[in-house]
Image (cartoon, grey):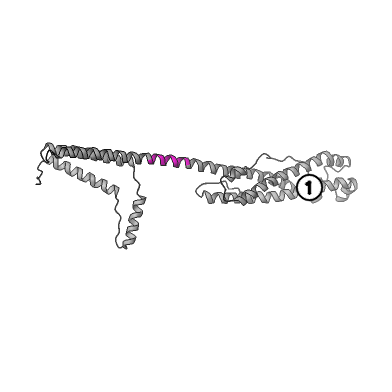
Amino acid sequence: MLTKCCNPRTACAGQFVSRGFVVLLRKSNPQTTTYKLPLRTALCDKEENLNQYKYDPIITGIFVGLAGLILWYFSTLAVAESLAPKWVEPFLDFFTALCGAFAGAYFAFKFGHKMEQGKRQLEEKKQTDSEVAIINRAILNLAIQLNTVSNIKSEIDSQNSLHQAIFGMHAFKNFHDGARVDVGELALILNNSPQLLLELSIEQDAFLLTLESLKVRNEFYTNTLQPKMSEAGLLDRPCSIAEYESKLSFGDRNTAQLAFQHLNKNVTKSHAGLTNKIFLIRSAAKGIYPNHKFMNIENT
């Protein structure tokens, strides 16, 4: 037989508990609007919303714990007010303890899972940032190499004529010759671009060859050609091809010409190759990490 509750305190408490459980149920099972939609579409949207639903296990655990305490308190109050038979009290105590243990274990597990997921996401972010930094360092080293080759190319292009470049261009020091790209380090990141890694390795050898050709030409000009041109009075003034042919031996002229031709050819190839590799590496990196920024080198 049901007993009508005339105690205002108990009635208000019951309403509070009832509304609290309604809020929790709405929080755990959000409603979706399904007006004028086919049944299959509505069910798919319902499932998608449930999968996308994210909640904080700490806040939810606090609400469930408070709800359990409130339920226990007003249940004992109901027994004390003789609104429920005495034999209900042991079952209420057992049910409250069981629900509290279950809720505590469940939300402790969810909290631990969320902490582990956050830790894993942080490690993945650090790994991604490290790989992005490696790619940017490689692009920077390629840009330094390109700048070195561009400076050599600019010096060659500033000469008025071919024979002026061969005999009149003074020896000059290459600028940054210590920049290198670690292809093995990039291979761990760009593992889906083996051909690009191979071409990049070849391009590094081409850059070293360009520097070596500049060194050979400088040594020949400083140690052999310049002293003989000084003796013949050919330095620091414009000279014709006939003067060079009449006052310099065939061997010196031929060696000077070959040294310059090798230098010019290597500089031209290296300049085009480095420009292309910077573009390809940046494009490959943007394909792997589209939301990250990479150095954009504009060749002028």
- Which residue does the image show at 20% across and 45% down from the upper left? 18
- Regarding residue 74, the answer to whether it shows in the image is no
Among the 4 quarters of the image, the one containing residue 55: top left
User: At 26% from the left edge and 48% from the top edge, which residue is drawn?
Assistant: 25
Residue 122 within the magenta-colored segment of the rendering: yes
The amino acid on which the numbered mark 1 sits, given as a three-letter code, is: Phe
The answer to which quarter of the image holds residue 65 is top left
Q: Is residue 41 left or right of residue 241?
A: left
Please name whichever residue, 15 or 176, is drawn nearer the observer in this view of the structure. 15
Q: Position of residue 276 (x, y in %)?
A: 64, 51
**Vertically, is 280 above or below 72?**
below
> Which residue is labeled 1 in the image?
260
Image-based side of 290 in relation to 76, left or right: right
Q: Main secondary structure of the magenta part?
A: helix
- Which of the 4 image quadrants contains residue 64? top left
User: Bounds of the magenta span?
Assistant: 113-123
